[in-house]
Image (tube, rainbow, N blue to C red):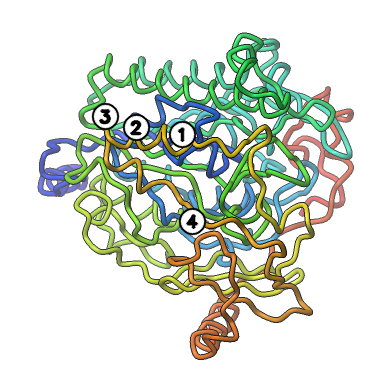
Amino acid sequence: MWKHLFLTFLSLHCFCESKSTSQPNIIFIVADDLGWDDVSFHGSNQIPTPNIDQLANSGVILNNYYVSPICSPSRSAIMTGKYPIHTGMQHSVLMAGQPFGLGLQEKLLPQYLKELSYATHGVGKWHLGFYKYDYTPTKRGFDSFFGYWLGAGDYWDHSEQEPDGWGLDLRNNTEPVYNQWGNYRTNLFTDQALDVINSHNTSQPLFLYLAHEAVHSALEHDPLQAPENLIRKFKDTIQDEKRRIFAAMDTALDQSVGKVLAALKAKGMYENSVIVFTTDNGGPANGVSRNSACNYPLRGTKYTLWEGGLRGTAFVHSPLLKSKGRVSMDLMHLSDWVPTLYGCGGGNVSDLIGLDGVDMWPTLSQGLASPRKELVHNIDPVGWAAALRYQNWKLVVNASYGPDRDGWYPPPSFQQNPSRRLNFSNSAALNPSLKSAIVTCPPPPAKPAECGHKDGPCLFNIDKDPCEHTNVANQEKDVLEMMLQLLEKYKKTMVPIRNKPYDHQANPKFHNGLWTAWCDEAPSDKCD
Ligand SMILES: [Ca+2]
């Protein structure tokens, strides 16, 4: 009877749009550490991303869309629909030997969608905990998972090296995978995603979460890895060797998007699919884990609360969108995906309780005004660096990261080539959405505004000054005061951080060369 009632409810619900007669497939593609200027739809003429551009330009480009500045917090927000300050994931990332993960009391996106009868498959990166098997993807709502549990790894041999160990990190569900040595990760994960699509029983809606490693750096001693044939494509156009290899990594990602689209079309699933593409954080253009990504002209890098760390490259594409081929400037946060996709999949969004995310589907599909007026970028109780938005205003406090991360970093080999804009004028003629997707700013100031502990809070008008050239805290004292009060309000809602000290028993040398759920396999006194 319950099943009958459920199906009756589904038949009455509009799903994403009335055009759809069945629940849409949801294809959620996450790029890792992809910068603002690493896709050509944002203006880069260094690295063409034609497959990504095609979907972005004929979908809705999200140009006022925010992610967390680092991996684990972003992924926790995608999965839970909550700010990291409300799940304990607001400080740093999860390192290999730390016995914690995203809390088991949290309900995750694949669990929400399973309630709506979706098949749920994960491919690629997890990075939300694995010290016990209960924290791994197939215990948390995914029917299947093929990928890695840590934050990064070698693209060819699938090992991950962290300060206290080096071992294999590749899993098929919970089983180690030993036979993919030499298979380039971006292609390997693409092939897995195509297998999911090709073998899918279309009587059921599909949720495919494809979280690439691309374009994250690999191991510290060999951070940039790409197939030689792709690197050669840029031998005449990008002089800087690191940026050239990065361009090849980016190209492999772009090709993956094209293959996924082709598979959806071949299977007859495309017309009823919603494709989301998002980076998890801005590019680490300078400083630690530099991968030669680029956020120019935005300020700052991955790890920082500047726009270069937070303003995410993203779009949504679907034949089900009513108003498409446009750039959305509606404020959006990646915690919005849970309610947006839950509603799109046939769920009643009013059933969702305790989320920070809001249902953005009417905004994305029809261009209706965004229900979101404010968002918390982060509040880190270790050092109290914090930033939040209220409409066009951005407050930044206790944030200072040094000259490698606080500035503006043009792409390596970049030259002020007039064709950069000319090219996009031409492209924009083909699609009027493209031109407004490009953020342009005057040349940056010689000295960035300082917003560290000793400097006092900063205030930026992001609409007028998206590149954070000018701190207007002294000119807009009422706004500043209002936002400081807003920050205090959010501070009171924070939960404690979940991070735990490193456990050396996690070292793969104790586990047959594997990063594994060591607290189940061989519990130490640091396992709770
Ligand atoms: Ca990342």
Residue 500, horizontal then vertical, whole percent: 78, 56
Circle 4 residues within 10 Å: few <14, some 14–19, many ≥20: many
Q: Position of residue 31 (x, y in %)?
A: 53, 36
Question: Where is the C terminus found, in terms of image quarters?
Answer: bottom right
Mark nearer the viewer, 1 or 3: 1
Which dot marks residue 427? 2
Q: CA distance from mark 3 to mark 4?
A: 31 Å
At numbered mark 2, what does the secondary structure look like: helix, strand or loop? helix
Q: Are marks 1 and 3 in contact (CB under 8 Å)?
A: no
Determine crowd level at label 2: few under 14, some 14-19, many 20+ residues with C-alpha closer than 10 A: some
The picture quadrant where one finds residue 59 is top left
Name which of mark 4 and mark 2 comes first in the sequence: 4
Q: Nearer the viewer, mark 1 or mark 2?
A: 2
Quarter of the rendered structure image containing ligand 1: top right
Residue at 42 percent across and 67 percent down: it is 354
Residue 517 lies in what quarter of the image?
Answer: top right
Of label 1 and label 2, which has the lower sequence position? 1
Q: CA distance from mark 4 to mark 1?
A: 19 Å
Q: Nearer the viewer, residue 486 or 451?
A: 451
Mark whose residue sits in front, 4 or 2: 2
Name the one closer to the observer, 45 or 347.
45
Q: Which mark is residue 66?
A: 4
Work out whether residue 103 can be spotted: no
Q: Regarding mark 3 in the picture, which secondary structure is present there?
A: loop
Mark sitting on residue 204: 3
Identify the mark at residue 40; answer none if there is no mark.
1
Give the crowd class for mark 1: few <14, some 14-19, many >=20 residues within 10 Å. Answer: some
